[in-house]
Every structure is written in structure tokens, then in C-alpha cells.
Amino acid sequence: MAKTAIIQKIGGRVDMEPLAAILSTVRNGTYTVTIKRAKEFRSLPQNDLMWLWLKCIEDDTHTPKKDIYKYYCKKFLSRYTTINGQSVQVYDTSSELTTEQMSRFMDCIQADALTELGINLPNPQDKYFESFYDEFNGR
């Protein structure tokens, strides 16, 4: 049975304890160790900002934010696959995205909201973001 150890290199140092712990549990024998970079899934701040934006769009359009979310997932995260010989459209959700993919997804939402709905969704570094945050957070 495969076992997984998550190892981090921070400041040039590697903590080998997770790997050592797993190795101490295996039977005698020959093993292959493969190291691959872990995917960094979307961050909580990215997710929070996306839902804040969706709340803003909900207030302006009177469309439930969950429906807006599904609309954007279908619009920007859709792809085609073959099921039983037929090409069908499927779409991912933001929980499956890396931080980089989530950033691109949010750029698409922000651009679409502005061009299609006339809604300017600010970023945290924008001058008036704090007042936007206060208005839409916690509602």
C-alpha cells in the first residue's frame, strides 16, 4: 500500500521527520521514493474574496450568489469529455483549482462583471476596498 509524506523545504532546510516516520513503519525490502511538487490549491483569502464578489453581484442582480457561482464555473471552467461515446460538457468548481488557476478564474469573473454587468469588483489593494469589504462582508 502506498504511503504519503508531506515534506516542506523552508529557508533551505528540509524537515525529514514525516518521511522518517513513514519509513519506520514499512517492512524490510526495497522501495522507490518519488518526490513531486504538491499542488497549492486555492487559498482561503482567494475563496473569501470570490464569495464577497459574488455577494456584490447578487445584491446588484438579485440572482442568488450560488447560481452566479455555478454560472461562472460553467462559463470559465467548462471543458468537453467523452462519456459512452458522446461528447459532453462538464465543468470544474473552484475547490479543484490551484492558486494560479483560481487567480485566472477570478480575473475572468472580475472582467465579466465589469463588461457584462457594469459592476466594478475591487481587489484588496485598491483604494476603496475597505469600504467595499465593510459593505458586503457578513451579510
Image (cartoon, rainbow, N blue to C red):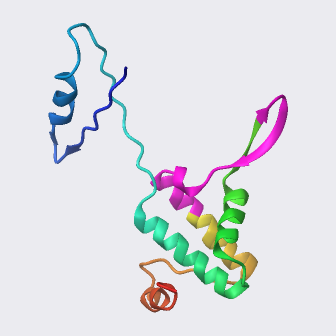
Give the vertical position of 112 relative to 139 (above or below).
Answer: above
Which residue is the extreme one toward the right? 86
Give the quadrant of residue 31.
top left
Q: Quadrant of the N terminus?
A: top left
Q: Nearer the viewer, residue 21 or 40?
A: 21
Give the quadrant of residue 12.
top left
Give the vertical position of 123 relative to 77 (above or below).
Answer: below
Q: Does 118 lie within the magenta span? A: no
Q: Does 89 lie within the magenta span? A: yes
User: Image point 72% across, 57% down: which residue?
Assistant: 74
Q: Which residues are magenta?
A: 82-105
Note whether residue 120 is visible: no
Q: Position of residue 68 (x, y in %)?
A: 68, 71
Count of residue discs: 0
Q: Position of residue 136 (x, y in %)?
A: 52, 86
> In the visual, does 70 lie left or right of 5?
right
Give the vertical position of 82 relative to 117 (above or below).
Answer: above
Note whether residue 118 is visible: yes
Give the vertical position of 3 relative to 13 (above or below).
Answer: above
User: Image point 65% across, 80% down: which residue?
Assistant: 57
Which residue is the extreme one toward the top? 29
> In the visual, does 126 lie left or right of 2?
right
User: Image point 47% across, 84% down: which residue?
Assistant: 137
